[in-house]
């Protein structure tokens, strides 16, 4: 359990946006205390978004801290309870003006303990689909949102909003949609240099997966599919509790020499991998947004993704939808889809042409401005 800065300096994109604001925009949160709560520091999309949010709020004059409920890695129930207790104490001790959360356990703590601490604004993001949340956290979240322990509930996509359609009207009245924003760093498209940096031989076709290594992300089916795809390698960027199982699966199917586990890599290096891979694969079983897929699209990567409503939402703009969507969890079907995409000589050109449209739709300044407007209404 810890409180950390995530980043000592604002991300480049945030710093650039700050310079374009009106003079009063950078001070409207002056002196306000903000606490952002996250489950654990796994280097994933939520951690990235929290870092961007922190930099923006600090640029507006707020004093911001980020607190992680749990240490990295698997935790026993007792240690998790300790993390919850420590987080509750942090809220009571700090008494922030604004609490911001991204996951159900953190949200319920913010709702109950934040109210007891006199926190004026409690903003929770829904980054889990209701049916895929822990049952206890789901019941508490539904109850707390309905009775008003949350000030605002943010959904990051139309698909996420739709998933809460059967929740009580009092809960849904507190919902507002703010789609994630993404700003990708400049990249090198020198494929040989980028691949060699990660010890990936050039010459074969390269698939890229980027995700926290959990069962939800579905990377096991791509590893199994690789056995039917000679001359194809899979690079996996990310860390998480499923790594050992995925390594064993690659060995079991005779593809261990063609699966490259890169662990955590920073966003600049990941962006270069998006830019040079032959395909980005996104086989996740559920998402509320699909941040990695949007980042890959902005950098022009051809994408083969699970056929989820939210991915059709975020990877299509004005009816243009160049990605390949796979409606199955069967590795054999994934092998066929990947093979067909690699044989499509126009796929990369279509993906590159689509990149600007995605970047325009999911701009980071838009997300930050919309969030700041919501927060400003709550804290005055």
Image (cartoon, rainbow, N blue to C red):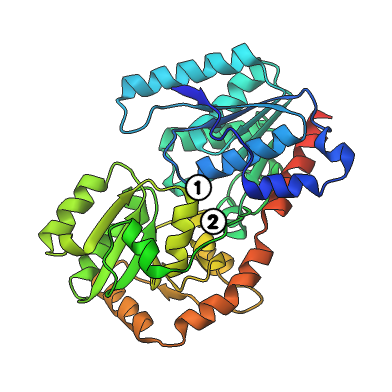
**Please, is residue 191 above or below residue 162 in the view?**
below
The answer to which quarter of the image holds residue 153 is top right
Q: Is residue 200 visible?
A: yes
Q: Is residue 306 visible?
A: no
Seen in the image, is 80 located left or right of residue 310? Answer: left
Going 34% across and 20% down the picture, which residue do you hit? 79
Going 32% across and 24% down the picture, which residue do you hit? 77
Q: Quadrant of the N terminus?
A: top left
Residue 87 location, x and y as percent?
51, 20
CB under 8 Å between discs 1 and 2: yes
Choose between 222 and 13: the one closer to the eye: 13
- Describe the element under mark 2 as helix, strand or loop: loop
Q: Quadrant of the C terminus?
A: top right
Residue that mark 1 sits on = 45
Residue that mark 2 sits on = 289
Crowd around label 2: few <14 · some 14–19 · many ≥20 (10 Å):
many
Crowd around label 1: few <14 · some 14–19 · many ≥20 (10 Å):
some
Measure the C-alpha gap from mark 1 to mark 2: 10 Å
Q: Which of pointers 1 and 2 lies earlier in the amino acid sequence?
A: 1
Residue 71 location, x and y as percent?
39, 27
Going 63% across and 79% down the picture, which residue do you hit? 319
Going 16% across and 60% down the picture, which residue do you hit? 256
- Describe the element under mark 1 as helix, strand or loop: helix
């Amino acid at each position: 359990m810890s409180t950390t800065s995530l980043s000592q300096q604002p991300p480049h994109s945030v710093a650039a946006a700050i310079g374009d604001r009106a003079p009063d925009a950078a001070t409207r949160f002056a002196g306000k205390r903000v606490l952002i709560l996250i489950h654990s520091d796994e280097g994933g999309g939520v951690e990235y978004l929290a870092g961007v949010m922190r930099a923006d709020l600090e640029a507006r004059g707020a004093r911001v801290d980020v607190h992680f409920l749990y240490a990295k890695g698997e935790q026993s129930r007792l240690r998790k309870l300790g993390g919850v207790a420590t987080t509750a104490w942090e809220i009571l001790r700090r008494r922030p003006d604004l609490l911001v959360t991204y996951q159900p356990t953190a949200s319920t703590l913010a709702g109950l303990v934040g109210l007891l601490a006199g926190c004026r604004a409690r903003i929770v993001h829904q980054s889990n689909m209701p049916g895929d949340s822990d049952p206890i956290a789901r019941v508490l979240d539904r109850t707390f949102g309905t009775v008003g322990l949350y000030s605002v509930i943010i959904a990051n996509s139309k698909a996420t909003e739709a998933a809460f359609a059967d929740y009580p009207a009092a809960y849904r009245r507190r919902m507002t949609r703010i789609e994630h924003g993404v700003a990708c760093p400049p990249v090198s498209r020198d494929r040989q240099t980028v691949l060699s940096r990660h010890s990936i031989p050039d010459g074969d076709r390269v698939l890229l997966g980027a995700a926290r290594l959990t069962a939800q992300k579905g990377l096991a089916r791509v590893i199994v599919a690789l056995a039917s795809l000679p001359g194809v390698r899979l690079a996996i960027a990310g860390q998480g509790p499923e790594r050992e199982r995925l390594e064993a699966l690659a060995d079991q199917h005779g593809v261990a020499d063609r699966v490259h586990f890169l662990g955590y890599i920073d966003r600049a290096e990941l962006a270069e991998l998006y830019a040079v891979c032959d395909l980005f694969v996104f086989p996740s079983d559920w998402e509320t947004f699909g941040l990695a897929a949007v980042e890959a699209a902005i950098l022009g990567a051809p994408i083969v993704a699970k056929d989820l409503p939210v991915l059709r939402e975020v990877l299509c703009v004005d009816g243009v939808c160049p990605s390949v969507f796979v409606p199955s969890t069967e590795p054999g079907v994934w092998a066929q889809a990947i093979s067909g995409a690699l044989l499509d000589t126009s796929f990369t050109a279509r993906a590159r042409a689509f990149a600007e449209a995605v970047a325009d739709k999911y701009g980071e300044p838009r997300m930050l401005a919309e969030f700041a407007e919501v927060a400003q209404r709550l804290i005055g």
